[in-house]
Image (tube, coloured by chain):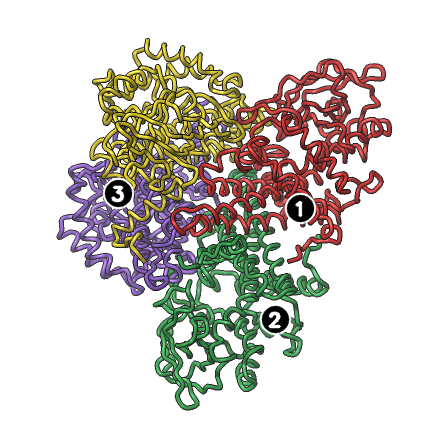
Chain colours: A red, B green, C purple, D yellow
Amino acid sequence: MEPIFATDRTRELLPKIKEFIEKELYPLETPEYLAHDFSHVEPILQQKRQLVKQAGLWGLHLPEEDGGLNLTLCEFGQISEVLASSPFGHFVFNTQAPDIGNTELMHKYAPQHLKERYLKPLMNGEIRSCFSMTEPEFAGSNPTRMGTTAVKDGDDYVINGHKWFTSSADGAAFAVVMAVTNPEAAPHKRASQILVPMETPGVKLVRNIPIMGHAGDSWASHAEMLYENVRVPQANLIGAEGAGFLLAQERLGPGRIHHCMRFIGIAERSFDLMCRYAVSRELEEGKVLGDTQFIQGFIAESRAEIDAARLLVLRTAHNIDQFGAASVRDEISMIKFFTANMMLRVIDRSIQTHGGLGMTSDILLSYWYAHERAARIYDGADEVHKSALARSILKGYGLDVRRKK
Amino acid sequence: MEPIFATDRTRELLPKIKEFIEKELYPLETPEYLAHDFSHVEPILQQKRQLVKQAGLWGLHLPEEDGGLNLTLCEFGQISEVLASSPFGHFVFNTQAPDIGNTELMHKYAPQHLKERYLKPLMNGEIRSCFSMTEPEFAGSNPTRMGTTAVKDGDDYVINGHKWFTSSADGAAFAVVMAVTNPEAAPHKRASQILVPMETPGVKLVRNIPIMGHAGDSWASHAEMLYENVRVPQANLIGAEGAGFLLAQERLGPGRIHHCMRFIGIAERSFDLMCRYAVSRELEEGKVLGDTQFIQGFIAESRAEIDAARLLVLRTAHNIDQFGAASVRDEISMIKFFTANMMLRVIDRSIQTHGGLGMTSDILLSYWYAHERAARIYDGADEVHKSALARSILKGYGLDVRRKK
Amino acid sequence: MEPIFATDRTRELLPKIKEFIEKELYPLETPEYLAHDFSHVEPILQQKRQLVKQAGLWGLHLPEEDGGLNLTLCEFGQISEVLASSPFGHFVFNTQAPDIGNTELMHKYAPQHLKERYLKPLMNGEIRSCFSMTEPEFAGSNPTRMGTTAVKDGDDYVINGHKWFTSSADGAAFAVVMAVTNPEAAPHKRASQILVPMETPGVKLVRNIPIMGHAGDSWASHAEMLYENVRVPQANLIGAEGAGFLLAQERLGPGRIHHCMRFIGIAERSFDLMCRYAVSRELEEGKVLGDTQFIQGFIAESRAEIDAARLLVLRTAHNIDQFGAASVRDEISMIKFFTANMMLRVIDRSIQTHGGLGMTSDILLSYWYAHERAARIYDGADEVHKSALARSILKGYGLDVRRKK
Amino acid sequence: MEPIFATDRTRELLPKIKEFIEKELYPLETPEYLAHDFSHVEPILQQKRQLVKQAGLWGLHLPEEDGGLNLTLCEFGQISEVLASSPFGHFVFNTQAPDIGNTELMHKYAPQHLKERYLKPLMNGEIRSCFSMTEPEFAGSNPTRMGTTAVKDGDDYVINGHKWFTSSADGAAFAVVMAVTNPEAAPHKRASQILVPMETPGVKLVRNIPIMGHAGDSWASHAEMLYENVRVPQANLIGAEGAGFLLAQERLGPGRIHHCMRFIGIAERSFDLMCRYAVSRELEEGKVLGDTQFIQGFIAESRAEIDAARLLVLRTAHNIDQFGAASVRDEISMIKFFTANMMLRVIDRSIQTHGGLGMTSDILLSYWYAHERAARIYDGADEVHKSALARSILKGYGLDVRRKK
């Protein structure tokens, strides 16, 4: 049945992309690739990127002027879901975070010289980038508290600070660093986003933080960073000075759709694995897992939850396309916790269905179980979004939760 | 923001209906009406029906030829939600179950003489009807097991059987009775639907079954019925002989949308009550319920769940409109358990927010808490729908759960 | 298997009480008694009380000097569970709230003349009483906010105030009223408990508040009360002036055990009903409900949850017996929300297992479903207890949540 | 407050063990040890084992005749909880699975020559062992389906088979292998347990199966094994021929207590970490995580759930001590799913409280999150235990779920 949000372009693109992923990427889901660091998989993924280009599927997220298709957010969301059915999908199509976010940011706000030097090779997949915002000393729920500073000195900024969860810093060509440039301004106008080439003296990747027991590497890593007297030209500023949070907010709307549709793609694939196993795993002569109601319950609940979440996210994408992100802030909060929790439940049920096999890297699920737990934390923890959503709703009923009490 | 499934007609109708309900029906939500039997409220509701007619809003569910608007299911679903925001809404607009289902059924399948005599006054709100299917001796999850028989004798059927949960039988003019007419046929082709006037000798309303401690009356009741040698003309057959289950199935698609949108209307209103109370109930000087995160959590989760469920149901309605109920059987199963459970969670959170007041009939919530618990049971218990949905999904993976093992 | 907390006395008493309840009270579980007001059942329950006396089982909650057995709280808790397996059990054994709490209170703190006049007939089951504390204008979560006042005038108090949820006021001989006597004292030392005979001029039972659609009557009711210039002798003071909250606190420990063990008794009986129905209700030829995994899941989860909750409550009772209520405040908070939620889940599963029958008053469950929802609200809502428990735990880690921020 | 199940020995031992663990093992919880394979930690743990011996705390699980303390299961359970508060605790005290199970098994059933050669060094911590039962081709829920065979040839068994999840095989001195010796016997009497030295020709450790992306090594690994014409003396049989399942059952009772108390120790420590972080992590000036109700909810619910689970498990241990494992089969099923799920919820809440830090190996939680997910699978998946428990309960109501239908 035709999905509600289908367009001519999704009708054309989705089958092609699906076919590509099933043919080229699913076969990589072996312990060889699932149980080694990313750098071990990377060479073959780079080959697959060439196939994407040959297939004319490169740059799906880009505007027309950059050789893309100018897809709406709602269209790209549907593609993003399919890409996420393989853990390698987004990388191979060069639509992986944080590069996709940096691409969008720079497309809109970077000065021309930075576009030439950094955005072009980024869009071509020749370099990678990272986004350096979170700091270990301050709770992520309150982004305006920030210790990193960028002080003007001549034509330069001199940056000092301590960051972590700078994802994909390992091997990146540059970081977009959030730093306080205007300490005297109102809290939301203190910080700016500055492009910092990774080879700049003073940029120090302290370590890839071990997550669930393993540090990872390359794109699949999360760095702790030190910026010690890092000197970059003021011309490396992206957007206006003091506009750091505004830009971060702006990347949030589309970024949220990307994340949530990725969650849905993961859930959908986990669901598919669950069903496949349910029909094939024998419990006793002539009886398979799928014959049992417990597993049927997992399947039915997951089906309903995935469908509901997808509609919620695509509605939000549609509304962003129509009315702009600013007017659907509540929806943007809502989809985050709703979809992340849904995904984790579906992964969990699929693992449970697989029994011991589900814990192993012989199949995909445990990879997602471990890595996607973070979905309820980064980019706003559940609790932050729930409070924000409720505050906004209650404001409509005349209560300002943040009033001085 | 414009809802996804808005049409010109919903744009025109919804505000009018909302206004009517808020003005005419919300004021009835007092212990006077919430803590008495339906017959106590009925006279004033009949007056309100006149106002509906005067406002030109009568017959929203009817086809054009019967003076209705020929609304799509997706359009009517959106109206149904709004009607359900008051427990009296559907009754006042004459779109209440089981009459709405009987209306649709008779419109399509009743012979002309039954339409003249019964359908017309039903559509005018002059009489009420009931649907007599469930039997205490047989589990509702397997409708083909049925003890009630209709045996031909001359030009008549002679009906014998024992039914319960014949909702609204008290005061109804007729029942549509499901009875086995072809005991030798395949299980799904044994039963027929026969119109039985309630004044026919042998029709015995044993009792209005007490539900949660109270028997109720009139439209708001659920009867136990005995049919003892009840003789009606064979001309009272609705549809073909043996087509009883087929017709029951057919009423299911639209009926499910009606139910589920009603659930959503109830959830939405419960949500509204929760928010109103949250901003007004003081916990201590200068601090209200809505300032606390527990209540904020209730609000945020409810908002997301209601929105997701509504999209899921309206998508299904839209697909029934486009492709017919037969092709969206899975969705029709899915929305039932997903939406009913969502509604009950939201009602429960709203009650919890209201504290002791939530238990009382000073406000609406406890009425719904008690009466809508049945939503997870009637018309297919959660467990039945989950199994059915999973079986259908697994069939797509090559497993026939119902094969002989 | 011998339960952990068995004693010689429980070994002797429990089988007798069980037998009595099964023989004398279970047969009353018919629509005749479940779907009518309490006054309709009361005469037969009064007869049963005589049988209790004849069987030597009267006064189980009383100290030796009052003709009781001096049971420990842990012993009485185990009895309370069994009594609660019938909705009439506690009433028939005269251990029903709020009388049991008033009995304990007066035993300890009432002056002799009140004991003679009120406590004795209360212990004999000749009169009933109520406890008038909650006020509609103030959130129950903060009991120190109270509008009712008792002003000295000569030898009397003159009481004015508005109360609700004064359970069992209908037909009671007296109320214990909480009123502010010392408005200038610290918040926790402002109120006193005063015995007010119901026939005193100015005591007005405004209404039995309709709960879930029905007002109820007699013992099974919850009154809204007005006290208008109610004049009682100062000698009717129970405990010291200003000690109202202290005494309310003190009744809380044992009261909590009573409530929670009652919850467990209800859960256990609901579980029993679920199992009985599961083995007898046929789904199809040769297959009953209990053959399905969904129902098996309900049963297994309920079994574990009931057992765990019982151990938690009896441990608390044991610790109160050993160390006093003051030293197990955290446990006393913990068992409330843990047990109430458990009970409601088990009732809900049992209803779901029974299908339509579960909604009716042909069996017990819907009675409990409707009436016991309040368990998560009265005597401290879930949210209040969770916060209180967490605050106390965090204090152990050095955080004073209530510090001035 | 004195715990319910305290004895003189727990009173004496628990504080000593706690102190040891806090002083010697907690400091090892650094990325250095949490984010590397076990072999990297092992040398320092071996040193700690010497300290345990010096402290006179070695052999807590052993009977008196083997130099142990003859602790009851209920006593050892309480110790096991404390040991589990460090992921290295059980290993350092030599009470780690699967060695503890093999120790108990061999103590009871191994012939003297095996005790001399293998049990003694095992008890001394000089060698490690493994238990080789699960096979990839057969669902773990039905252990009687087994492909591995041991065929008599002269004085030997010749073993052929394919196993996986042979935990800790890497570096073990011997495996206890479950193999079919009597294929013609009743299903439960077909298999035997045979000790197989790992250096025997034909024993092949195919791989340490990567779990959540990583293969691990040494004790912390789960091997896939091939047994190809492995020849061992028939004298290596443990217990009677055909008694394999009986012995596996027997190890189950105590083994279940070990597991569940370990779960509780993990939950308790996760709870402690959550509270510590809640009081110290600042959200804004003067406001910490613990000031928010969401976190308070996590804390309160966790506290109640841990306490309830502990009581349930210790009651079971107590009953096994009193009445034998055979008479508490239901409890042994019940504690598994109840406790495992509780533990995973508490870990999850603790991670959520820690935000990004919770995902990292800078603290313990993510290690447990990833590794303990298996708790709902191994040793009987939730679904298996729930069905088994329900079947047993329903048998008491007269229903034999396993009857031929």
Quarter of the view holding residue B19:
bottom right
Position of the C terminus of chain B, as image quadrant, is: bottom left
Q: Secondary structure at mark 2?
A: loop
At x 75%, y 49%, the residue is A322
Give left or right: position of A227 versus B265: right
Sort mark 2 into few (<14), some (14-19) or many (20+) by Cα contacts within 10 Å: many
Of tags 1 and 2, which is closer to the observer?
Answer: 1
Residue A398: % across, % down? 63, 45
Q: Residue shown at 28%/32% (left/top)?
A: D152
Image x and y of residue C321, in percent: 25, 32
Contact check, label 1 and label 3, Cβ < 8 Å: no
Q: Secondary structure at mark 1?
A: helix
Q: Which of A375 and D167 lies nearest the eye of the viewer?
A: D167
Whole-Å distance between the Cαs marked 3 and 2? Answer: 69 Å
Mark 1 residue crowding within 10 angstroms, few (<14) / some (14–19) / many (20+): some
Q: Which label sits on residue A18?
A: 1
Please determine whether, in this image, residue B51 is positioned above or below residue D135.
below
Q: In the rendered view, would you say C340 is above or below B78?
A: above
Q: Amino acid at mark 1?
A: Lys
Left or right: where does residue D400 sit relative to residue B117? left
Q: Chain of mark 3?
A: D
Query: Which residue position holds label 3?
Result: D185
Q: Chain of mark 2?
A: B
On the question of residue C400 being in view, the answer is no
Q: Nearer the viewer, mark 3 or mark 2?
A: 3
Q: Which mark is residue A4?
A: none
**SS label for mark 3:** loop
- Could you tell me which residue is drawn at 39 percent across and 12 percent down? D48
> How many numbered badges does the structure rendering display?
3
Quadrant of the rendered image containing residue B147: bottom left
